[in-house]
Image (tube, rainbow, N blue to C red):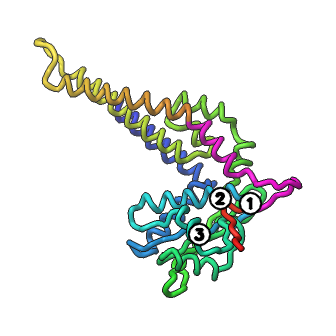
Amino acid sequence: MLKKMMVVSTLLVVTLHTVSAQAITIDTAISTAAREISENVPEGAIIAVLNMSSDYARLSNYVIDELIAHLVSTGLFQVVSRRAVELEVVRRELYFQYTGYVSDESQRSLGRFLGADTIISGSITTDSANSYRLMVNAIDLESLVYILSYRASFRNDKQVTDGAPSTWVAFGLNFFPGFGVGSFVQGDTTGGGIALIGDALGWGLLITGLVIRANNYDDWGPGDRHNLGTGLAVVGSIGLVGTKIFQLIRPFAYTNRVQIAFSPAINNSGNLAVTAALRFKLD
């Protein structure tokens, strides 16, 4: 029974990976960019993520925040916080915006002020009606050469969400059969992967524990490994309950996040506008 569960889980991983690989999500694009940076920028470098120009301020800010989080999680670099950038802009009376166009010279100057070795900047442009194009550049401030220039097209998740199965469908599929199927269908590969691993481990531990318990009885009662089987079964059950709760919440959290990220800033005239997350101009 356990072998059958592992075979089914493996086939499910391969199938869902093949489907999801056909359409890159924004989170996949960001995590891949972070991995490329970690593989090309020298370990221990001081990195400042400065600018991500686009017509969608919230989307730009989302990419910047997620990219910073990924770089910090590697533990390979010293990453300058956004708060430090803001304070430096105010102190030096600079005109700077995170989400609009900023000249290369302005970025390099701010990077030097912050004591950075490498600055990260980029842009998000419309690739097609259903996708955007992310460009991320890493520049070494000492030599002024590009260390990395990463490009990737990712789906317009808001449009995909509007045309894809609803959040409630994802909720239902995550409830049964589980294994993150609903999240994968929704396009949430991160949530689907977490749920898939959680369910696979939970069922594996539960079934293994029950098998050990069943095989450790004799005429004299429970055998020496009976308690081990009980413990594994309990841990597996707890893991399954926790994973199921995650799967039922995740579709709504994912839908809310992509709708916020892909909502354009609107000015008073109703036109799309690049709203600067940070814009100081001190006289």
Give the x, y percent position of residue 129: 78, 57
Marker disc for residue 154: 2
The first of marks 2 and 1 along the sequence is: 2
252 is within the stretch colored magenta? yes
Q: Is residue 132 above or below residue 215?
A: below
Image depth: mark 2 or mark 1 in front: 1
At a point 17% along the width and 26% down the height, the residue shown is 225
Residue named by callout 1? 275
| In the displayed structure image, the side of residue 187 where residue 15 appears, left or right | left
Q: Residue 164's quadrant in the figure? A: top right
Q: Is residue 225 above or below residue 140?
A: above
Image quadrant in which the C terminus is located: bottom right
| In the displayed structure image, the side of residue 60 where residue 213 appears, left or right | left
At a point 48% along the width and 71% down the height, the residue shown is 47
Give the x, y percent position of residue 220: 10, 12
The first of marks 3 and 1 along the sequence is: 3
Q: Residues within 10 Å of mark 1 (few under 14, many from 20)?
A: many
Image quadrant in which the N terminus is located: top left
Image depth: mark 2 or mark 3 in front: 3
Label 2 and label 3: CA atoms lie apart by 21 Å
The first of marks 2 and 3 along the sequence is: 3
| In the displayed structure image, the side of residue 49 where residue 71 appears, left or right | left
**Residue extending furthest toward the bottom:** 143
Q: Amino acid at mark 3?
A: Leu
Q: Is residue 67 above or below residue 214?
A: below
SS state under label 2: strand
Q: Amino acid at mark 2?
A: Phe
164 is within the stretch colored magenta? no
Viewer-proximal residue among 14 and 251? 251
Marker disc for residue 197: none
Residue named by callout 3? 50
